Image (cartoon, rainbow, N blue to C red):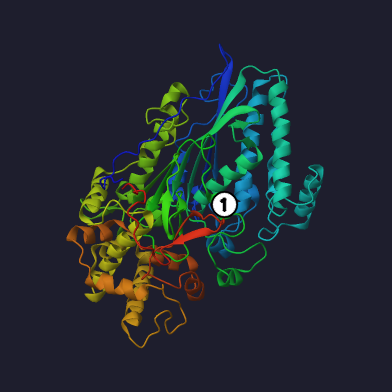
Amino acid sequence: MSTPASMEAIQLTCPLPLPTRKNGLCDDEVNIGLFFDGTGNNKETDQPHNSHSNVARLYEAYKENGKNRDDPTDPYPNFYRYYIEGVGTECEPINDPGGTDDGAAFGVGGKARIVLGLLHVLNSLYQFVMNRHRKHRYTPLFDRDRIAALCYDSNYVKVAPEIMAKYQRILLELKLSDSLVDGSKNAREAFFREQAGKLTGLLSHFDTRPTVTSIYLDVVGFSRGAAEARVFANWLNDTMMHSEGKLFGINATIRFMGLFDTVAAVVGQGGMGSIMRAATWREGHDDWACIRDLQVPAKPIVQNCVHLVALHELRTSFPGDSVYRDQVDPHDSTRHTEIKPDNCEERIRPGSHSDLGGGYAPGEQGKGVDRNLNPVQSDDGHKLSQVYLNEMYQAALASCELHFDKKPWLTFSDKQADTRNMDQQFTSNPQIKNAIQNYFTQCGVATNLSLEHALKQHGLRYLAWRYQVNKDKRFEQLPSMQIAWRTDPGRVNYCLEGEKVFAQQVSDLEDDRASRNMDEEGRRNHREAKDILRQIREMRNRDGLEWFFDQHVHDSIAGFREQTKSNVKFDLAEQQRYVRYRLLYRGVDAEGNSVPLNSKLKPLDATTFTHMT
């Protein structure tokens, strides 16, 4: 099947609300929103600079109860929302100090965040029941100290001896020898099953009115946060939900899962140093991010999943994880096709990783600016990510359109939306969406490609632009660079360093004396780097594409160089540099092994499902 390259609205099937009892005048539902932010993204530190991610912005659009159990006028008593900071940043509930290589580069801290999400689910239902039963004073099932003890990661987080002693007392009270992060998978699953059983008994025997008859979860994630969201859904299903869609004995479902460019990239096990982690990089599916747990659960566990994939992300350390699944042709074992789960919609979108999920400040690298003004001004509404933010928001609304007055998402006319400045946070200039549509029209890439081949073709067009700019020695004269000197002077040198890395790699590849797979510094090139270079030398983009790349697409490799602050760490993480295809993983094969794509492309299979653009 095929579809035109466009920004048409993503069509979701909104399921009917979960069944309730007949004449259930005192029936009620609970809505829980979980928002897993991406690597290096932190709402508290980023929002003052308008660089907070789309996960943080969607969190602001989710309804929340007033946290006052005695307030009968609370308009949203049934709604709970939780924001979980990205790995590599401070996350106070789990005592993650942030700012470490293990977190930012290798995904350490992700397991604790997933456990935190599961504890939030337990706390939400317990709080709802206790708030409704006026004879009982509300106390959380898991208070701050219990959460910190259960989420403690001894290989990553260091605490004072007296704090450690307190954690050990708490774990002993809970009949645990280790935290849910340090302990075994069996111990973790047994703990959550036990807690779910207790809450099931409480809900079935507690004489409360109204009665909880349905539970809805909405889960959003970006980058490693998207990987956390996918693992969260599987761990929830494995320990507390049932295949028929019951949570604590109540009809339940993950109504909406919104994912921005999933990247697992989890390397090594607990206790490994950062250099050892880099040296043992295999697939990025170590520890908590095993490939099995990254598969989106089928209906009725997850009703609708939307996944947006970045077309112009080239970093070696940011391979993508598709929500589609792999299938071997029964008549030819060398040919693979992709299977589209019936609850998933995957779309390709132009831009680098954070051009989709957000995280760039207006004006960063001279992009996200209003060029209609004189002088040019930084403008949040001119970022690509704002278009994709609104696209995901509309998909979330569509997933619950039959819920009428019980929808979990705020609209711009709601009072809470006004106090949270939703208008400002969701601003998007129509010119940017038009520019994206024009890109698809002008790029010359067929629309009936599988994801692996789409990433290849769109990536080549970006590299062809960079090659031509480098050949003409006009990088510093690009309009975005001229603007960056005014809007983002502190990062200009990193952009220039990125151009030097690209120029040196091209020079090495063009030198016949250079090794095919390794440069003089011992850095390995992508196995098809020579062929990629040949193609981008021959490729000519339309002027509109060059304008689009310069004005809108950030150089994520240059940005990563800024984050690493070290040539050694940068070279370890980004050995293949620019001239490469983005690595993609597509589920597991019949033997349970992950399926890497674009490391060595297979022949194009015309029978593969189309990736709608």
Residue closest to the far front: 331
523, above or below 262, in the image: below
Give the x, y percent position of residue 42.
50, 51
Q: Amino acid at mark 1?
A: Arg
Left or right of 308: which side holds 107?
Answer: right
Left or right of 1: which side holds 267?
Answer: right
Number of labels in the image equals 1
Left or right of 15: which side holds 117?
Answer: right
Q: Is residue 299 visible?
A: yes
Looking at the rendered image, the quarter that the N terminus falls into is: top left
386, above or below 301, in the image: below
For this rendering, which residue is in front, 121 or 430?
Answer: 121
Residue closest to the far top: 23
- Residue that carries the numbered disc 1 in the rendered image: 292
Task: Identify which residue is drawn at 48% across, 24% down.
Answer: 406
Residue closest to the far left: 543
Q: Secondary structure at mark 1?
A: helix
182, above or below 246, in the image: below
Give the x, y percent position of residue 513.
36, 88
Give the x, y percent position of residue 272.
65, 67
Q: Is residue 149 visible?
A: no
235, above or below 560, in the image: above
